[in-house]
Amino acid sequence: MSNIQVFNTLTGKKETFTPSPGNRVTMYACGPTVYDLSHLGHARMSIVWDVVQRYLRFSGFDVTYVRNITDVDDKIIRKAEELGTTPERVAREFTYTFWNDMHALNVDPPDYEPRATEFIERMIKFTQDLIAAGHAYVSGNDVYFDVSSFKEYGKLSKKTSRICSSAHEIRSAAKKSWPNAKRPRPISRYGRVSPKANPAGRARGDMVVPVGISSARP
């Protein structure tokens, strides 16, 4: 296998790529939110990770590549209202359009392509677990991750102290606006589920394959 050098954002330097265990590599990339036609950002994301997974396979690694489809979102719901149709139909049609566009760009399909709607219950359970562990709190109809509860938060971006300081101020304001923030309301009162990158991606990725390499949404 090739001696591949990759940039480690955490250490700020290039390092030898050493997967664990053995030569197995698992990759997770955030795919599109299918509410409209594909754009340049979708192409860039797909081509970049397609090149990565192709080269890793070429180099002799056993690669499992997962790319999700976010098929439930406020943008999809609004598009459905504009078109006078259902969110399901909007998501389905633009998923097919995305696939066709990626095929035209000669982008290989991923090994697995989980859809957000297949993991709603898992996302809800994941959110409940975060709240129970003191890592998230409810404010209004939303749930927020409490970054001050995770001492490593912001380490990658080198903004730990500033982020946690701001988070403390935000949470304090939220507690004042909603006195019962320490006792989260039932999950069914959180409103329509609109998954965002981190909890949704984590729930979907871990259900399919333990993730080793992951990407942020472009």
Image (cartoon, grey):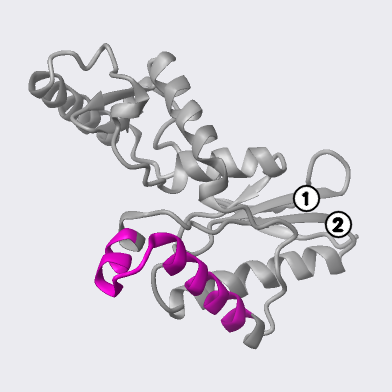
Residue at 34% across / 40% down in the picture? 159
Q: Is residue 67 above or below residue 89?
A: above
- Badge 1 density bin: few <14, some 14–19, many ≥20, Cα 10 Å: many
Name the quadrant containing residue 212.
Answer: top right
Q: Quadrant of the N terminus?
A: bottom right
Question: Percent from the top left, x then y, of residue 183?
Answer: 27, 11
- Kind of residue at badge 2: Phe
Question: Percent from the top left, x then y, of residue 103?
Answer: 66, 82
Residue 10 visible in the current orientation: no
Question: Percent from the top left, x then y, of residue 111?
Answer: 75, 59
Residue 61: image tag? 2
Relative depth, front residue between 37 and 54: 37
Give the residues drawn in magenta, as a range.
77-102
Relative depth, front residue between 206 and 122: 122
Q: Say left or right for 57 vs 120.
A: right
Residue at 39% across / 68% down in the picture? 35
Q: Is residue 56 above or below residue 213?
A: below
- Badge 2 density bin: few <14, some 14–19, many ≥20, Cα 10 Å: some
Q: Which residue is mark 1?
A: 25
Relative depth, front residue between 70 and 18: 70
Residue at 78% across / 45% down in the picture? 19
The answer to whether residue 84 is magenta is: yes
Question: Percent from the top left, x then y, of residue 208?
Answer: 70, 44
Q: Is residue 95 above or below residue 14?
A: below
Q: Quadrant of the C terminus?
A: bottom left
Q: Are marks 2 and 1 in contact (CB under 8 Å)?
A: yes
Q: Disc 2 versus disc 1: distance between alpha carbons?
A: 7 Å
Q: State which tag comes first along the sequence, 2 or 1.
A: 1
